[in-house]
């Protein structure tokens, strides 16, 4: 059975803890009664309650003591409520803390605006020294967790709620900087996928349009700068698909890193969801769906051929 991102994280961390007694797990009242790490290693599991900033501060102290702390809470509470602690602990102190943030984007759809997080990449990308990852599928999540544990560097790992995604093909040794799931005509548009839903939509758009598809896992400036060089070596027009605001997102970053290329973003825009619904319904209300990706691809292709660009679409 394919695991969701957050379940794959918990399972992989529990397996790592069997080999490394320095691995510890902290949660802000999310673990539930059947958290595998708590069951296997209760002496290394800490439920700190709804005190997210204090949890990050505790983790920084544990890191200074030689431990490898992994902390987890809802993305809006990790990236926004605990922002000062992240800035000081992961940034200024460069503490080897890994923050795993489920419920990113609007994956907590029914919970409402307080539990949505479309701003976390903008916040974390502005903190120097933090490695930022948004894995797609169980295999990528496991690989990112293993890499974070080995590196000892501060990490922010973004994931969704309960949805499980079939993993892309990965090399055995390590995650590629750019995973070229499909390569077509270099003069054509290339879809660039970010995160779980961005990748799901890009895969569907690639199947419908025949466009190239480049998938990114690591989204901090250091990794994106190197990825941009690889992207520019193959294409000059990109549609970046991400479940995030346009401001501070990956499309904006790539546009600055690729000044000689055309970069269009398909994202969650500027609105606040005012009605409930499941994850996909809320995304659609924000204009983040397959029709928006197809429209952006068609418009970029039309512009390249010198035809009038058709109106409509929700690309931003």
Image: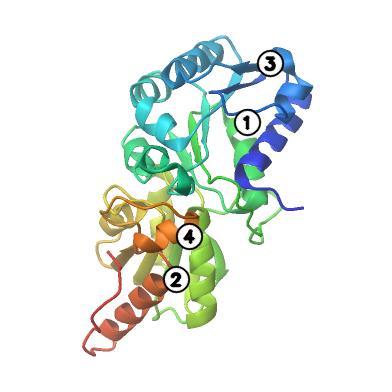
Q: Earlier in the sequence, mark 1 or mark 2?
A: 1
The relative height of residue 164 versus residue 43 in the rendered view (above or below) is: below
Alpha-carbon span between mark 2 and mark 3:
43 Å
Check contact, mark 4 vs mark 1: CB within 8 A: no
Q: Earlier in the sequence, mark 4 or mark 3?
A: 3
Residue at 77% across, 53% down: 1
Residue at 34% across, 72% down: 237
Q: Earlier in the sequence, mark 2 or mark 4?
A: 4
Q: Residues within 10 Å of mark 4 (few under 14, many from 20)?
A: some
As drawn, the residue found furthest toward the left would be: 308
Q: From the image, tell me which residue sits under label 1.
A: 150
x and y percent of residue 304 in the render?
Answer: 28, 83
x and y percent of residue 72 in the render?
Answer: 54, 29
The residue mark sitting in front, 4 or 3, is 4
Check contact, mark 4 vs mark 3: CB within 8 A: no
Q: Which mark is residue 44?
A: 3
Q: From the image, tell me which residue sits under label 2.
A: 290
Alpha-carbon span between mark 3 and mark 1:
18 Å
The residue mark sitting in front, 3 or 1, is 3
Numbered disc 3: secondary structure: helix
């Amino acid at each position: 059975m394919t695991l969701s991102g957050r379940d794959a994280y918990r399972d992989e961390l529990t397996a790592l803890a069997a080999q490394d007694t320095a691995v510890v797990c902290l949660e802000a009242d999310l673990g539930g009664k059947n958290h595998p790490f708590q069951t296997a290693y209760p002496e290394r599991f800490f439920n700190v309650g709804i005190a997210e900033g204090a949890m990050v501060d505790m983790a920084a102290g544990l890191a200074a003591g030689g431990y490898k702390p992994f902390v987890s809470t809802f993305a809006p509470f990790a990236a926004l409520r605990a922002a000062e602690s992240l800035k000081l602990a992961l940034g200024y102190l460069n503490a080897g803390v890994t923050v795993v943030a489920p419920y990113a984007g609007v994956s907590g759809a029914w919970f409402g605006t307080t539990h949505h997080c479309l701003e976390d990449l903008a916040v974390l990308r502005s903190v120097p020294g933090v490695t930022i990852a948004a894995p797609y599928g169980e295999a990528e999540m496991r690989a990112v967790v293993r890499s974070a544990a080995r590196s000892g560097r501060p990490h922010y790992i973004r994931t969704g709620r309960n949805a499980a995604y079939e993993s892309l093909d990965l090399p055995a040794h390590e995650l590629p900087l750019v995973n070229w799931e499909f390569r077509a005509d270099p003069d054509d548009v290339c879809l660039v996928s970010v995160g779980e839903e961005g990748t799901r939509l890009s895969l569907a758009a690639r199947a419908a349009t025949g466009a190239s598809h480049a998938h990114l896992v690591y989204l901090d400036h250091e990794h994106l700068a190197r990825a941009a060089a690889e992207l520019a070596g193959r294409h000059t027009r990109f549609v970046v698909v991400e479940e995030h605001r346009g401001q501070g997102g990956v499309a904006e970053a790539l546009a600055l890193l690729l000044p000689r290329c055309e970069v269009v973003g398909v994202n969650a825009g500027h609105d606040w969801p005012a009605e409930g619904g499941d994850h996909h319904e809320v995304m659609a209300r924000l204009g983040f769906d397959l029709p928006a990706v197809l429209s952006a691809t068609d418009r970029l292709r039309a512009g390249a051929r010198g035809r009038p660009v058709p109106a409509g679409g929700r690309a931003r």
